[in-house]
Image (spheres, rainbow, N blue to C red):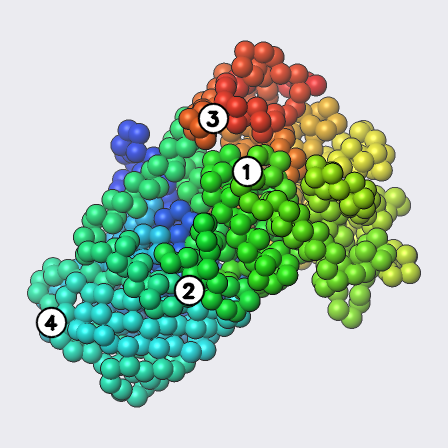
Amino acid sequence: MFSYKIYAASLIFFIGLSCSKNEQPPENKLTSYVNTFIGTDGPGNTYPGATVPYGMVQLSPDIGIPGWDRISGYFYQDSIITGFSHTHLTGTGAGDLYDLLVMPTNSRFKERIKDNNFKPFSKFSHDKESASPGYYSVDLLDYGIKAELTTTLRTGIHRYTFPKDSLSQIHIDLGYALNWDRPTDTYIKVVNNHTIEGYRKSSGWAKDQRLYFTIQLSKDFDSYDLYNNDTLVEVSTKGTNTKIVLNYTTKKEEQIVLKTGLSTANIEGSRKSLDVEAPDFNFDSYREQADEIWEEQLQKIKVTMLTDEQTRIFYTMLYQSMLAPTLLSDLNGNYKGANDTIMKASGFDRYDTFSLWDTYRAAHPLFTILHPDKVTDFVKSMLAHYKETGLLPVWSMQGNETNMMIGYHAVPVIVDAYFKGINDFDVDLAYEACKVSAMDNTRKIDLYKELGYIPVDEENENWSVSKTLEYAYDDWCIAQFAKDLGKNEDYNYFLNRSEYWRNVYDAESSFMRPKLANGEFIKDFVPKDYSKYFCESNAWQYFWSVPQNIEGLIEVTGGKDRFEEKLDSMFSLNPLPTDELPIFSTGMIGQYAHGNEPSHHVGYLYNYIDKPYKTQKIIRQILESQYKNTPDGHCGNEDCGQMSSWYIFSALGFYPVNPAEGVYSFGSPIIKEAKLSLKDGKTFEIKVKNNSKDNIYIQSIQLNGEELLRNEILHSEIMNGGTLIFTMGKKPANIN
C-alpha cells in the first residue's frame, strides 16, 4: 500500500531554512531567519509557499488529499505533491481556495491514486525542498523536475526545470477541488501557443468566489489537450470541470517559466496584472524583488534575541503576521464585492480575508504600529464591505461574508485606528457602520438588546455566553467612539450595553454561566466542559473576556485576592486524562489554551491586581513553551496572524489587553534589544538589561531616562519615539 507519510526519523533532521543547516544567516539579511515551514505540521495549518506581504497570490504546494491536517493544502508529514495552486488561507480551520492548480509532469511516472482523485502527483523529500519569504522550491522526484515558485502582489511565477523528455507536460486544472471548495463554473481559452486565459468560479466557505486569470509561458507549447470533464475540445471550453495539458519536448535542464496574472473582477484585470507586475520571464528578478519587499518589512523591527532559535522564531512570526489580510482589488481598482457585483476601489486598495474574531486582539494593534498606511486601507475596505452589504464584516474573504465566528469585531479595529490618529477615512461613515452593525437584529442581537444577554436556545444554540461577552466589548468601543464625536446619547446607551457581561455572571459559581430566557441560569453546569454555550472554549477560558472593564470583573469576583486565586487556578487546573478536549483546545497550561484566542490576554491580568511578577512568569513560560522553530512550532491554528502577533508583542515585553484602548500591558521580554522603525522617521528602542533564561522578572523600567512606575505603556509613547529600558532579575520585584 502506498504510504503518504514520511518516515518519522526524517522529521528529526528538519532544517529550519533551506539555505542553511546550522550556519548563521548572512549579517543583516533578516529574510534568512524566516522559517516558512513553522506551522505546517501539527495544528498550525500554515502553508510554506511564496507570497508577498498582504498579496493576492499565495502560490504554494498542495498535497491534493483532503482533511483537517491539510486544510492549508500542505501537511509536513506527507510525501506527495499534486500541484501548485495560487490561493491559500494561512493558519485557519477553513478548507477553501486552492485555485488554479498547475502541475508539471513527463513520461517517467504514471501512477494514479484514489486519495487525490486520480490527479497526477509526485513524491518529494524535504531534503530536496526549500523555502524563504517569497520563494519556494521542491524537486518532483518521480519526474526529475525542479519546481520553483515566486510572486508579486497579483501574479504567481513558476519556473520548472525539466529533464530531457519528448512528453514533458504542464497541467492546468480548474476542476481541482479540495476540502470545502467546489468549482461552479470554469472557463479556459487558448489565446495563442503561449497564452491562456479564463476564470474559475467556485463555492465553499466563500459562497461566490471568482478568480480570473491570464497565463503566459516563456516557451511556446508544441500542442495542447483541452478537456471538459474527460472530453477533448478545441480552443475554449466552459464547465465545472475543465483542464488543459500543454505538451512540450524538452532538453536536459531546460527551464520553462509560467506566470499567472489574477483579478477577482475580470480577465482584463488579470492581463494588466501581468503587464504591469510581471512583464518579462526573468524568474530570478521576481524572486529577488519579493525577497527585497520582505526584507524591507522585516527591517521595521531589528531585534537581538536571547538565542538564535528565538531570533528565527521572532522573524518567522513577524513574517506570518503579514500574510493576511489579502489584496482583493486589481490594478484597475476593480474587485468582486460582497454584494456579488463588480465594485471599484478609488483611492485605496481593497483587502479581504478579515479573520476578525482572531485578529482584532493583537494582529490589528500590531499593524497600527508597523503598518499604519495599511491600516487605513484595511478600514476603508471594511467600510466598503459595509456599503456593499449594510453591515461591517464578521469574517470576510474573497468578496464574501462567511459569518464565521462571532461579534462585530471590525468595530474595535476601526475605533482603535481612529483613536491612534489613523483616521484618513470617512469618520462619519465609520461611526454609522459601527452603530448599524451593533443595532442589527440578526445573530441574536435582537435578543441581546431586549434581554441584556443572549439566552440559551436548546434547539439551535449559538454560543450564547460568548456572544454576550464579545458584543459587550464591541459596544464599549462604540461608546468611546460616540463620546469623542459628541454623541452623548449614543455614548450612554452603548456604555450601558458594554456592561451586559454582568448579566451572565453567576456569583454562585463565579463564572459566566449560560442563562435561560426566563432569567434563570442553566443547571448541571461544569465550567471546564466544552459546550455549545461557549465559542470554541469553555467557561474557564471565556470568564476573562471583559477587557473593557477588568476592574469591574475583579470586583464581582470578590476582590483582588479572590481574582488572584482564580487566575492561579486557571493556570494550574490541568485537564484530566478522561476529559474530552476538542481539536481547538491546544497549548494547554491548566485551563489556559494558548492555541485559541480567548485566552490570549489572560496571562497579563495579574498586572491589574498588583502582582506583575506572576504575569512575567507565565508570559515567559508561554513564550518559551508554545512556539518552536520546527514544523509543529505553533501550538494551535496560526489564525491569519494572531498567534504570530501575540509572540511579537510579548517578546518585545508588552501586549494590548484591551485592543482598542491604545495601552499595552507589560510582560517579560525575551529580547536583548530591539529597534522599531516607525512612521515619520521616528524610532522606538527597547533595551533589556541582565536578561537571560533565568532572569525573567522585571526589576525596573525606564522610559526616556525616567523611571516608569506603572505596568503599562501608551501607544502614543511608543509612536513618539524614544527608549524603553527593562532591567531584569531572578527574583520578583513589584512594580506598581
Which amino acid does the dot numbered 2 rest on?
A: Thr
**Disc on the earlier residue, 4 or 1:** 4
The extreme left residue here reads 251
Q: Is residue 617 left or right of residue 188?
A: right
Crowdedness of circle 4 by 10 Å Cα count: few (<14), some, many (20+)? some
**Disc on the earlier residue, 2 or 4:** 4
Residue 671: mark in rendering: 3
Q: Name the residue under label 1.
A: 422
Q: Is mark 1 on a helix, strand or loop?
A: loop
Question: Marks 1 and 2: CB-CB under 8 Å?
Answer: no
Which amino acid does the dot numbered 4 rest on?
A: Thr
Inter-mark Cα distance, 2 to 4 = 34 Å
What residue is at 51 percent from the left and 34 percent from the top? Answer: 369
**Disc on the earlier residue, 4 or 3:** 4
Which amino acid does the dot numbered 1 rest on?
A: Ile
Question: Marks 2 and 4: CB-CB under 8 Å?
Answer: no
Task: Confirm whether residue 499 shows in the render.
Answer: no
